[in-house]
């Protein structure tokens, strides 16, 4: 989804589809805006669109589908060698459901948005769903777990983070 207020940027041919979800955020919704929100409280550097802000999801996508033979540079610009993604010929469908807001709300993931993103990914015919966020181990199934199980039953390879608890 396109937001005309985003600053122009270059993108390669890796991104096939991009969607974003803010409908569950009733305090920022505005149906006339891209993704359904007004962005008044978004953290500086975040985008009210499917565009990433160079954070975790962007990093995971680059690791998974990064081009072959790309020059790696350190923070001083020194050449470190050539690197490649795990599947350099892969393409990416982006389903952005996580948002950063001012006032201490960081990485907000409304369950309704996550469920809609999973449903859309299944409908769009993706081969893999990577959910690179997590909240730790639990013996209880929630609605996101069930949606991922249903996607896996339908032949989609699903990956879900187990959290950062070690």
Image (cartoon, grey):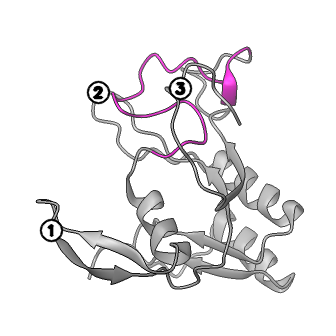
| Residue located 58% across and 47% down the image | 97
The residue at which mark 3 appears reads as 6
Tags 3 and 1 touching, CB below 8 Å: no
Does label 2 or label 1 sit earlier along the sequence? 1
For the residues marked 2 and 3, what is the alpha-carbon distance in whole angstroms?
Answer: 22 Å
- Give neighbour class at mark 1: few <14, some 14-19, many 20+ (Cα, 10 Å): few
For the residues marked 3 and 1, what is the alpha-carbon distance in whole angstroms?
Answer: 31 Å
Name the chief secondary structure element in magenta: loop
User: Is 39 contained in the magenta span?
Assistant: yes
Q: Is residue 6 left or right of residue 164?
A: right
Task: Report the residue that reaches farthest toward the left.
Answer: 76
Residue 134, visible in the rendered structure: no
Residue 34, visible in the rendered structure: yes
Q: Is residue 39 left or right of residue 130?
A: left
Does label 3 or label 1 sit earlier along the sequence? 3
| Residue located 28% across and 34% down the image | 104
Q: Which mark is residue 103?
A: 2
Q: Is residue 32 left or right of residue 138?
A: right
Q: Nearer the viewer, residue 41 or 48?
A: 48
For the residues marked 2 and 1, what is the alpha-carbon distance in whole angstroms?
Answer: 37 Å
Tags 2 and 1 touching, CB below 8 Å: no
Report the magenta residues as a range.
Answer: 32-52
Element marked by disc 3: loop
The residue at which mark 1 appears reads as 78
Q: Give residue 48's position: percent from left, percent from top.
A: 54, 30
Q: Is residue 96 above or below residue 15?
A: above
């Amino acid at each position: 989804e396109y937001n005309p207020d985003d600053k122009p940027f270059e993108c390669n041919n890796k991104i096939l589809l991009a969607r974003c979800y803010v409908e569950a955020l009733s305090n920022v919704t505005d149906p006339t805006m891209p993704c359904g929100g007004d962005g008044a409280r978004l953290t500086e550097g975040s985008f009210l669109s499917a565009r990433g802000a160079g954070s975790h999801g962007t990093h995971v996508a680059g690791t998974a589908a990064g081009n072959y033979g790309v020059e790696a540079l350190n923070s001083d610009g020194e050449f470190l060698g050539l690197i490649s993604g795990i599947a350099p010929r892969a393409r990416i469908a982006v389903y952005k459901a996580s948002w950063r807001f001012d006032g201490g709300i960081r990485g907000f993931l409304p369950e309704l948005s996550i469920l809609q993103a999973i449903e859309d990914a299944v409908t769009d015919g993706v081969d893999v769903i990577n959910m690179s966020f997590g909240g730790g181990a639990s013996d209880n199934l929630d609605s996101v777990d069930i949606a991922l199980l249903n996607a896996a039953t339908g032949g989609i390879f699903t990956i879900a983070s187990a959290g950062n608890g070690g």
